[in-house]
Image: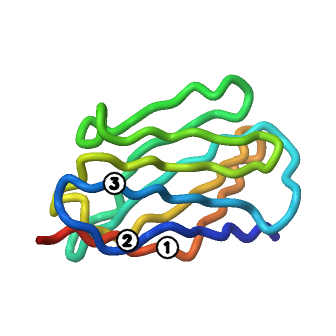
Amino acid sequence: QVQLVESGGGSVQPGESLRLSCAPSGRIFGANSMGWYRQAPGKERELIATIIESDSSANYADSVKGRFTISRDNVKNTVYLQMNSLTPEDTAVYYCNLHFLLSRDEYWGQGTQVTVSS
């Protein structure tokens, strides 16, 4: 069983930045993608960004393009989400996701709160 450990959430003012990190508790094997989702109060969980292990190709939701950057360290199997120019609309619980491409097994982190307010 894979456990994902997230860190880096917090409270910031509009326009500021945060960086989230997510790492599995142990080594993982197999082609995979890792990503970040978020869920704001009263809203469904939405995909923010994903990055594939093999070539580090990334995809972003339109709402964060140009502001957020996803990256990964394949040696550490750690994924990062650099969030710049944060707005109150970015306030949500952010969840890390690990998806194995062949088995389609999925794992989730416990979530980390990001609050943007003045």
**SS at badge 1:** loop
Residue 59: percent from the left, percent from the top? 45, 32
Q: Which of 54 and 15 is in front in this view?
A: 15
Residue 50: percent from the left, percent from the top? 52, 40
Query: Label 1 to label 3, Cα distance in Å?
Result: 18 Å
Q: Which amino acid does the dot numbered 2 rest on?
A: Val
Q: Give the number of the disc on residue 111.
A: 1
In the rendered structure, the answer to whether residue 95 lies left or right of residue 40 reads: right
Q: Which amino acid does the dot numbered 3 rest on?
A: Ser
Q: Residue 113 sits in which quadrant?
A: bottom left
**SS at badge 3:** loop
The quadrant in which the C terminus is found is bottom left
Q: Which amino acid does the dot numbered 1 rest on?
A: Gly
Task: Characterize the local packing of mark 2: few (<14), some (14-19) or many (20 or more) Cα atoms within 10 angstroms.
Answer: some
What residue does disc 2 label?
93
| For discs 1 and 3, the disc positioned in front in the rendered view | 3
